[in-house]
């Protein structure tokens, strides 16, 4: 049997084994597969019309989740390797999916896909050959994302070390656990760049469904804790094909007429000369119809943030510069930006959020559905976080635990500076915190005042070298978060009464958390 035939045989065995594995856990596998589908969406920031290839689609058990989270707006080629999946009922009900039986990866058209994805399909002893074929299938600049067995997980390690044990527990004969080193070496050897290998998903599917959701907050900590995170059952494998960046021009995400020429984007900026241009370009490219103004609040920058902004505003008058005088601080910059905003809605964000611009579509959807505001939440299993520092994760979780214990709300993450509100909510708010804690203060006070607020899952990706460095320092700003929480606890009744006086109905107290 030729080397190529052995490789394709591995794929058929892996697909069949993987199908059996997910069907072994019917109560938890739908949730875990949905999380992985959402990770695909958030990782790539998928835009309508971009093409996906799913390798080893089997009966479509994961394809269905992919199509759902992408809202049927992306053509998906679901390639399966076993004839038995040809008549799966899933294929008849999906909106934008082309299912096909594939005998050889070489039969698929070259350079045809923006993304290639898969789950538990590459962790076999000839996976490097698959990577070579996948590189051929991607468009220049295209990306891959696979979820594969982590060799350092104790269960995977035992199955790998004792093949007979692995086979008795359902492993394919060719199945292996992957290590970070082996994948990095193979992917780079085949020609991929920007390779990232991250331990992913520490929650085992054999747990009761109710316990899986109860353990979500702990899972966020364990999946980022040194040493413990290496024991996750899965590796998140991300890489890119070299080439010119995929063109995303002309993809208009502005679909709600109530936001046309009505949104003030307020962007605090301290030493952000590298990010102002890419961020404003991305906003205009995807949400230009919404833009009433983009306010770059230059918070005492020591670089060329002011000069870069002035140059942009000459080309595009809707970009406006607000130069602040000392003392600096994110809270002070937000106060000044909110005061200067003239749009009917205000969206505030950090200047390095250029990669997640497509995701703010979900915030607009929430407010269009009737919410007073929407907050980008990083801490749900429908979010994705890459390389988020463990100390910041721990502090964030402690803060929100204290908030949930002391306030009559259930919140997961309202401290992110990615917020869309009806303008009057922010303009009437007293923001007392001068620094980063203002982000938490704004979220808490909006909820305490009785406004209807929705947490929207978003991704968070750590800064690259090109983006510069963050000025966030936990030990310096941590006490201010405690003060912000205490202030809301102390003034919560007053805020609620003020809201009742503002409107006859009094609004609805609380926050909706989309999990």
Image: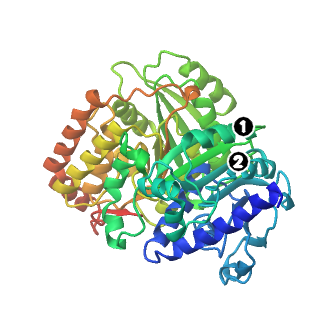
**Where residue 165 sits: x, y (%)?**
49, 64
Find numbered disc 2 in the image and state the secondary structure of the residue it sits on: helix
Residue bearing the label numbered 2? 128
Judged left or right of residue 500, residue 464 is right
Can residue 262 be seen in this snapshot? no
- Image quadrant assignment for residue 167: bottom right
- Image quadrant assignment for residue 69: bottom right
**Where residue 201 sits: x, y (%)?**
45, 55
Judged left or right of residue 56, residue 159 is left
| Quarter of the picture holding the C terminus | bottom left
Find numbered disc 1 in the image and state the secondary structure of the residue it sits on: helix
Can residue 186 be seen in this snapshot? yes
Which labelled disc corresponds to residue 189?
A: 1
In the rendered image, the residue lying farthest to the left is: 490
**Where residue 345 sits: x, y (%)?**
47, 50
- Image quadrant assignment for residue 48: bottom right
At 36% from the left edge and 35% from the top edge, which residue is drawn?
A: 335
Q: How many other residues sit within 10 Å of disc 1, few (<14), some (14-19) or many (≥20)?
A: few
- Residue placed most toward the observer, 16 or 119: 16
Judged left or right of residue 8, residue 15 is left
Q: How many other residues sit within 10 Å of disc 2, few (<14), some (14-19) or many (≥20)?
A: many
Judged left or right of residue 355, residue 86 is right
At 72% from the left edge and 84% from the top edge, which residue is drawn?
A: 87
- Residue placed most toward the observer, 262 or 460: 460
Determine whether label 1 and label 2 are within 8 Å by CB. yes
**Where residue 106 sits: x, y (%)?**
84, 57
Which labelled disc corresponds to residue 121?
A: none
In the rendered image, the residue lying farthest to the top is: 302
């Amino acid at each position: 049997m030729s080397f190529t035939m052995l490789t394709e045989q591995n794929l058929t065995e892996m697909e069949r084994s993987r199908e059996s594995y997910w069907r072994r856990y019917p109560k938890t596998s739908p949730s875990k597969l949905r999380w992985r589908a959402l990770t695909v969406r958030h990782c790539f920031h998928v835009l309508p019309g971009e093409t996906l290839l799913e390798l080893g689609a089997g009966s479509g058990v994961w394809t269905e989740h992919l199509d759902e989270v992408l809202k049927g707006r992306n053509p998906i080629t679901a390639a399966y390797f076993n004839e038995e999946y040809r008549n799966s009922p899933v294929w008849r009900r999906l909106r934008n999916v082309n299912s096909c039986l594939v005998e050889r990866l070489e039969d698929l058209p070259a350079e045809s896909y923006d993304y290639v994805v898969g789950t538990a399909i590459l962790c076999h002893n000839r996976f490097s050959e698959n990577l070579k074929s996948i590189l051929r299938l991607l468009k220049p600049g295209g990306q891959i994302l696979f979820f594969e067995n982590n060799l350092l997980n104790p269960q995977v390690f035992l199955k790998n070390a004792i093949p007979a044990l692995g086979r008795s527990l359902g492993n394919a004969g060719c199945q292996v656990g992957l290590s970070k080193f082996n994948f990095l070496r193979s992917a780079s050897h085949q020609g991929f760049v920007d390779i990232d290998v991250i331990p992913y998903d520490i929650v085992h599917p054999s747990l009761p469904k109710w316990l899986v959701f109860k353990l979500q907050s702990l899972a966020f900590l364990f999946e980022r804790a040194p040493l413990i995170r290496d024991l996750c059952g899965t590796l998140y494998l991300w890489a890119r094909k070299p080439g010119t960046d995929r063109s995303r021009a002309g993809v208009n995400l502005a679909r709600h007429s109530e936001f046309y020429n009505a949104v003030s984007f307020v962007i605090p900026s301290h030493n952000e000369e590298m990010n102002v241009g890419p961020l404003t370009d991305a906003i205009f490219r995807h949400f230009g119809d919404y833009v009433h103004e983009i306010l770059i609040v230059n918070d005492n920058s020591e670089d060329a943030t002011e000069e870069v902004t002035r140059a942009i505003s000459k080309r595009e008058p809707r970009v406006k510069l607000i130069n602040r005088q000392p003392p600096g601080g994110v809270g002070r910059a937000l106060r000044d930006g909110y005061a200067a905003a003239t749009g009917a809605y205000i969206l505030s964000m950090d200047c390095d959020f250029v990669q997640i611009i497509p995701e703010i579509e979900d915030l607009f959807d929430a407010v269009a559905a009737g919410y007073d505001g929407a907050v980008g939440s990083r801490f749900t299993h429908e979010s994705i976080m890459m390389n988020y520092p463990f100390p910041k994760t721990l502090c964030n979780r402690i803060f929100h635990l204290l908030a949930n214990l002391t306030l009559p709300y259930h919140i997961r993450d309202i401290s992110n500076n990615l917020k869309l509100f009806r303008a009057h909510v922010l303009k009437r708010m007293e923001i007392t915190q001068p620094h980063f804690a203002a982000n938490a203060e704004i979220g808490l006070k909006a909820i305490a005042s009785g406004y209807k607020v929705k947490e929207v899952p978003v991704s968070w990706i750590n800064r690259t070298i090109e983006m510069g460095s963050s000025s966030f320092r936990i030990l310096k700003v941590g006490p201010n978060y405690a003060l912000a929480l205490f202030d809301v606890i102390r003034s919560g009744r007053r805020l609620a009464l003020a809201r009742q006086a503002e409107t006859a109905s009094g609004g609805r107290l609380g926050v909706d958390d989309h999990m």
